[in-house]
Amino acid sequence: MGKFNEKLMRKLNILLETESAEEFIEKVVLKIAEMDQKYNVNNEQFTTKLMKYVMERKIVLGTPILYNILSEKNGASACTVIPVEIKRDFEKMRDGIYNYAMLGIGMGFDLDEIDEPIYTLKVLNEVLKSFDNDARRPTAGMATISAENINILEFIKMKENANYASWRFNLSVKMSDEFIEKIKHSVDVEVIVDGKNQTMKANELLRKMSDSMHFCGEPGIIFIDSFERDNPTPIFKYEGFAPCAEIGMSKGEVCHFSYINLAEFVNEGVVDMKEIIDCCRTGTRMLDNIVDHSIEKKVENTTNIIEAKRRVGLGICGTADMFYKLRMPYGNEESKILLENILASINYYSKVESVSMARERGKFQLFEESRYKDYEWFMRFADEDNQIVLKENWNELWNLVKEFGIRNSATVALPPTGKSASIAMTSYSIEPRFSLLEPDGSINSQFLFEISKLNLSEIQKLSLIQEVLKTGRCGDIETLPEEIKDIFVTALEVSPSKQIGIVSSATKYVDESVSKTLNIPNYIGKEEVNSILLDIIGSNIKGITLFRDGCLEGRETSMDLEV
């Protein structure tokens, strides 16, 4: 394979058969650079840097940008909470959602204010399915409901025997601080059971959620009050979430994502922090240009709030591959400190760049009503233990924000990066690798490099390679040193506690949350899943999804929805 996964790009209808990935990417970058000329006619330095970083896969563009940026009529946002009235009427809902689906925008729907939330969700799912043959990009949805909604039990069970091929929605339960206190004190909550109102202990309801997670991987949990505490514009409460729950959104709000590929910044066993910072500033400016693009294209019912917030999300991918190159076990203390230092830098310097743009281009419209006027809120990222971005740095930035404002209401988000990372041929977001095999079936090059240095016979090496080709893992290979096994772990070999530790470290330095699936082996039981949830409830983590390997196998999962 070349630098980019052209086969995947063609499969996703991003790339024409007649052009190479590099030719297409060049056109995209030049289009983005052209937008920058609105503010800076002589922007050759920005154009050169952006071209270099994207071609070297150091900046990875979000797939909505690849799909839509060259269009004369389409915005390039990744997800939204659609400002349409949710009713039982299939055709009316389809008409209201159609334009968003054609752009491949992920959609969040909150069901708390709906009279018949379960029935309505079934209708919404059929609506999203109806776009399968028309949309260039699959349409994903996130449905949320409060843990205190009387219909919560039916919501929890919705996908227990569902045909997953026919589902377009992820499900998440919003859990408030008040409900968490009810769990801790075993307080009664009201629920519907078999059509009748009954009471149930809050901790028993949590058990129902954890049992469903163990059984089928859903629902996820979102700690709604934690999200709201970090909401930069609290005059607009969050009314839904991105399909992977990395951000909360108001109605009509959208976000634009791209990523810094950490694996490409390792040189001779050292992470080039200086280049990450420069890349971060370039990526933030790029995303602000893309916000302008979406505003100009006037995507239905979103333009006003895009202008008001100018929200962007610079994320990361290639984290696991970076750890491989550094010979650093995933989830140990060293890896957590490194991740914290990198994300602290990305958060800080993305905001430095955003303040710089505010001086040139103007601050976001809601700045005066925002929490950026609140010193304590602004300084929440100033960690005394962080030796890379110091408290005094944040104080200096606070003074600049007071004077000039800031261009973007948020700058950092951690989506899952799936297709974007696959196009760049690197590991997803902060996830461990799921396999040592690449998309084309070859073995990870860094693993092969380490194997080549071992004092093994050629027959032993060949046997080892054949085993990895068969399983995608190396943890059970007796001839391998333990040190190598510890470095080249895959998702199911990383303990839940280490995965939670990585999420907690990342959460410290993102504007809101982290999209992370806690992957656990099949043998883990219901009690342990419930314990995991209780541990997360007491942490800084704002949301979690859990999936037990093989939980959907060997049972009926083809029940179609009845609408």
Image: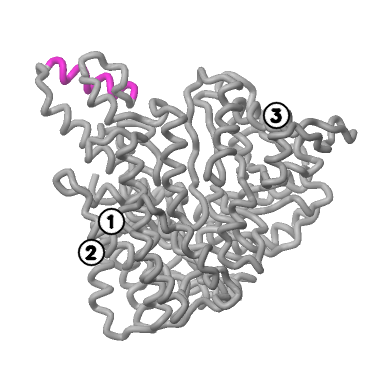
The reply to whether residue 334 is visible in this rendering is yes
Q: Secondary structure at mark 3?
A: helix
Question: What crowding class fits label 2: few (fewer than 14 Cα within 10 Å), some (14-19), or many (20 or more)?
Answer: some
- Report the quarter where the C terminus lies: top right
Where residue 211 sits: x, y (%)?
A: 65, 26
Q: Which residues are magenta?
A: 459-471
Where residue 543 sits: x, y (%)?
A: 56, 44
Taking the magenta stretch, the answer to whether it contains residue 280 is no
Residue on which disc 2 sits: 52
- Report the quarter where the N terminus lies: top left
Label 3 sits on what residue type?
Lys
Which of the 4 image quadrants contains residue 157?
A: top right
Left-right relation of 73 to 389? right
Where 540 falls versus 92 (above or below)? Answer: above
**In-front residue for pair 293/180:** 180
Q: Are marks 1 and 2 in contact (CB under 8 Å)?
A: yes
What main secondary structure does the magenta stretch of the protein show? helix
